[in-house]
Amino acid sequence: MKRYISALAAFGLATIISVAVSAQELDPENTLYMDLKDGRVTIRLLPDVAPKHVDQVKKLTRDGFYDGIVFHRVIEGFMAQTGDPTGTGRGGSDLPDIPAEFSDVPFARGTVGMARARDPDSANSQFFIMFAPGEFLNGKYTVWGEVVDGMEHIDAIKRGEPPQNPDKIIKMQVAADAG
């Protein structure tokens, strides 16, 4: 039994259980709605895992920063990256970079992580959503959220580096602010 529980913990049992949480049980202050051309994606924020990253993403979201920003790097079987106002992968917001908040939360399908340069403390506004598990990222990038609904809309994002006619975030909002 002990070996079974250890194996479940290693595979991110907490993440699996949390994905099963219904939208009605989500904390509106720690939930994002990301509207894409194909529909709405609901992201559960993890302030207990990455409080500084969650705060920055919420501030940028509330400022309308992410509205209209393209997915500039979308790799089949890996992830979709966005959050760069230039669409090149080199841009960010005017806010200060955020120190790394690495955790033991694994990069599973639907995990939302913060993109960064080589410096672990260089995350700013760019983030990515995993199409598939990426164990090689564990402990090296900050996890700050997880898709709990609408993953099929993430799966439909056009692939490429950069994609031809890239998909974009139509609107992103904190659920507590949604009307």
Image (tube, rainbow, N blue to C red):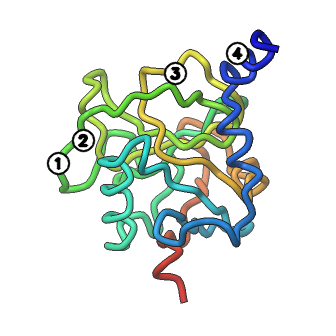
User: What SS does tag 1 mark?
Assistant: loop
Amino acid at pointer 4: Ser
Mark 2 surroundings within 10 Å by alpha-carbon count, few (fewer than 14), some (14 through 19), many (20 or more) = some
Residue position for label 1: 96
Query: Do the CB atoms of the residues marked 1 and 2 lie less than 8 Å apart?
Result: yes
- Between the C-alphas of marks 3 and 2, the distance is 18 Å
- 157 to the left or right of 48: right
Query: Do the CB atoms of the residues marked 1 and 3 lie less than 8 Å apart?
Result: no
Amino acid at pointer 3: Asn
- Between the C-alphas of marks 3 and 4, the distance is 17 Å
> Quadrant where the N terminus lies?
top right
Mark 3 surroundings within 10 Å by alpha-carbon count, few (fewer than 14), some (14 through 19), many (20 or more) = some
Mark 4 surroundings within 10 Å by alpha-carbon count, few (fewer than 14), some (14 through 19), many (20 or more) = few
| Residue 98, numbered circle | 2
Residue at the extreme bottom of the image, as rendered:
179
> Residue 98, percent across and down?
24, 41
| Residue 175, numbered circle | none
Q: Which residue occupies 75% across, 47% down?
A: 155
